[in-house]
Amino acid sequence: MRRRIGPFFTALVCFGLGTVPGVFAQEAADTASAQTGFGTEGNFLLWDLIGEAGGFQYPIFGLLAIGLFLISAKLYELYKDQKAARELEETSLEEMEMKRIAMLVANQKESMLAELQATMINVYQTTKDAATLHEEIANYIQFQRDRFGTFKLRIDFLADTAGAVGLLGTVWGILTVFTGGGIDDEQRVLAGMGVALISTLLGLVVSITLNLISTEVHSFFDNRLDQIEDKADELRFRLLELGLEETNGRREAVSDRAEAASPTPSAGSEYQNSDAAPEQDPDSVLRDGTGEATETGTIGASDSPTAVETRPRRLEVVDRPDEGTVASTLSDNQLRVTAGNGDPIADEEVKIEAGAADGQLNGGIAALTRRTDEQGVVSFDWHLPESPGTCEVHARVPAADGPDATCTLSVPVRPGGPRHYRQDGNNQGAEVGGKVPNPLTVKLIDEYQNPVPDQRVRYEVDAGGGTFENEETSTEVVTDENGVASVTLFVGDEPGINTVKSYVGDEVIEFQAMALEQ
């Protein structure tokens, strides 16, 4: 029921704001018609009164239309998100296992709740620590509040501007009363005061309307975020339970293995009542491929020792990429599993995981499991993120009788090529022969808004006789880590416009500076 109060109240407010001013406007118009002849024998249209606003009604109604469009779009977005997340909200996670939870979230339509829960699952699968998920939830909720805050600022701006336009009409109407014909002209006074009063009325009505509706939308949005946070907390508690169950299971397995490995003297043992076991026969010790001793236990009637299975001892990267580009895919990355003696191990399970900020693996997933081929090799594709930095993929071979074999594939990710630029320092002035106050700056960014470093930018003076710091009319600069290249310009010795062109590949960026007489 709480979800429907906001939109219902919003509709009621809109109806009221559209109806009540019309009633008062009708009464005011009837009075004005009786006193000034405005209207035709009581037949009155609201738009006739609004038309007396001297043209100020058009920008005011334009602001109202823009505001209502933005509010409608936001309401549609929220209702669409709520509908897409309905299955997740109605599904209880109390008894679900990790695999079922991951499949449930992965198969959902796009929504804020699905996005948040997918991030939580990725973080949990990477870190195995559900305690950090509270911070993930808080950060996501704050991000959505900041995003809505931008929308609220736009509506507030439109509401304030509508009121300001109405005030501008007031000033203009009063100004027309005291200019031109003076206050002795009754018709001019009536027309000017009509512009002042009606434009003010329209500005206030539109401002109040936008503020009230946006407040109700904000309330609805807060309720929606509360629902998302509650459901995310439910997933967090379930992951905590799964983590505790997994930890307890490992402890029981370790305890069982330790108990099974403890020697229990039998009734026929020749050292049953001895305080210490007899010294171990060197022949009862085998060595694996690494030269490490492996205890085989007491030799019975057979003279041949029990064979010991060689376990994986090493996991390594076969071919490490030098670097990658944002949003690109590194294909056929390979890892190899070998025994201690260097022999490849086939049909061995390898778990591969990418962090939340490190991109995605095959098919857009965060973690996958592969089994090695006859050469002990597994391969996978790695889709890099849209932000530069160092990205890592962690791999491990689970071992039941010892520590896991692990390795990390680390790749530096650089920005893409320059796609856009930002210009600074244009249209300056300086005395002839002098230096302009600010450098001529070009900032290069790729298609994902990342700065592009190490990119050459060539500057040339095209007209006006200016020079750069090297006292030449051309120079070349390499962008820094922030994607910025800048030069200092000295204008020519003659008054007039100096033109500088900078070249980035086929892109030409033009600057102008004025040489002023002393």
Image (spheres, rainbow, N blue to C red):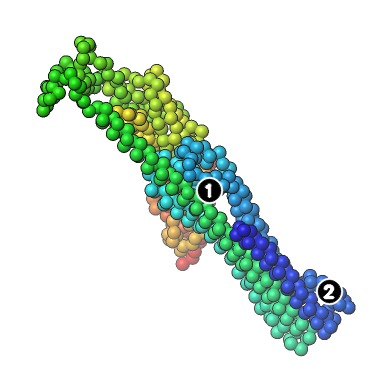
Sequence-first tag of 1 and 2: 2
For the point 20% across and 22% down, the residue is 266
Task: Point out the residue furthest to the bottom here.
Answer: 184
For the point 43% across and 27% down, the residue is 370
Residue type at numbered disc 2 = Phe
* Circle 1 or circle 2, nearest the eye: 1
Few, some or many residues within 10 Å of mark 1 (<14, 14–19, 20+): many
Residue 347: x and y in percent read 40, 21
Q: Please tell me whether residue 364 is drawn above or below residue 503 in the rendered image.
A: above
Q: Mark 2 — residue?
A: 44
Identify the disc placed on residue 342.
none
Residue 50: x and y in percent read 76, 72
Few, some or many residues within 10 Å of mark 2 (<14, 14–19, 20+): some
Q: Is residue 65 visible?
A: yes
Residue at disc 2, secondary structure: loop
Q: Mark 1 — residue?
A: 113
Q: How many marks?
A: 2
For the point 34% across and 39% down, the residue is 248
Residue 441: x and y in percent read 46, 53
Residue 61: name its quadrant: bottom right
Residue type at numbered disc 1 = Leu
